[in-house]
Image: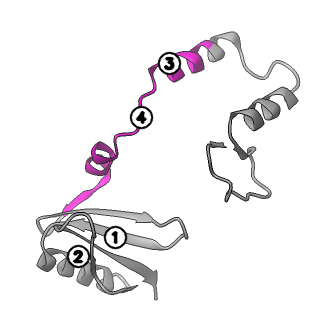
Amino acid sequence: MVFKRAKWVKAENCNMPVVIGGMEAVGEIKKVKGDNISEKEIDLIIEAIKKAKPLNHEEWNKKHSKEKNNCRVFQGKSTSGKMYVRVKGTKEGVQKVAEECKNQNYTISDIRQDKKESDVWFFYLEMR
């Protein structure tokens, strides 16, 4: 796994190398001995890289969110590892979503409004 501009990455005992940036990735690739990948696989990888496009976060969120209580709901983890729920909709809608989470044995934080989008709310989850 290659991270660009991420000096905070610290990984130990991984089943794959974790490196910061392209040069470290090249170094890891050079360490590999033998014919581990075929010419056909190399060509497929090259084509996939050529066709790769930047991630469209709005499109990704729509694809991976769920509709609940007339709201778009997305669940994820923060950079510090805390689980969160992000809800696009009304305050009443997010309160219903939070209530559902409580009924599923989660403790939730206070519901907060997003600073950039007035119709987006979020809260953090913890298993009881």
Q: Alpha carbon of mark 4 to alpha carbon of mark 1: how far?
A: 24 Å
Q: Which mark is residue 50?
A: 3
Separation of residues labelled 4 and 3 (CA atoms): 12 Å
Name the residue that disc number 1 marks.
85
Graded by Cα atoms within 10 Å as few (under 14), some (14 to 19) or many (20 or more), the crowding at tag 3 reads few
Whichever of callouts 4 and 2 sits on the residue coming sooner in the sequence is: 4
Asked if 72 appears above or below 21 in the picture, the reply is: below
Main SS of the magenta segment? helix
Quarter in which the N terminus is drawn: top right
Q: Give me the C-alpha separation between circle 4 and circle 2.
A: 31 Å
Earlier in the chain: of badge 2 and badge 3, it is 3
Tag 3, which secondary structure? helix
Calculate the distance from the C-alpha at mark 2 to the C-alpha at mark 3.
Answer: 41 Å
Would you identify the image quadrant in which residue 56 lies? top left
- The residue nearer to you, when weighing 116 against 122, is 116
Q: How many marks?
A: 4
| Image vertical order of residue 62 relative to residue 88, above or below | above
Residue 93 position, x and y percent, is 14, 74
Q: Nearer the viewer, mark 1 or mark 3?
A: 3
What segment is highlighted magenta in the picture?
43-67
Q: SS at mark 1?
A: strand
Of 30 and 98, which appears nearest the observer? 30
Q: Which residue is mark 2?
A: 97
114 falls in the magenta region:
no
Mark 2 vs mark 3, foreground winner is 3
Which residue is at 74% across, 57% downward? 11
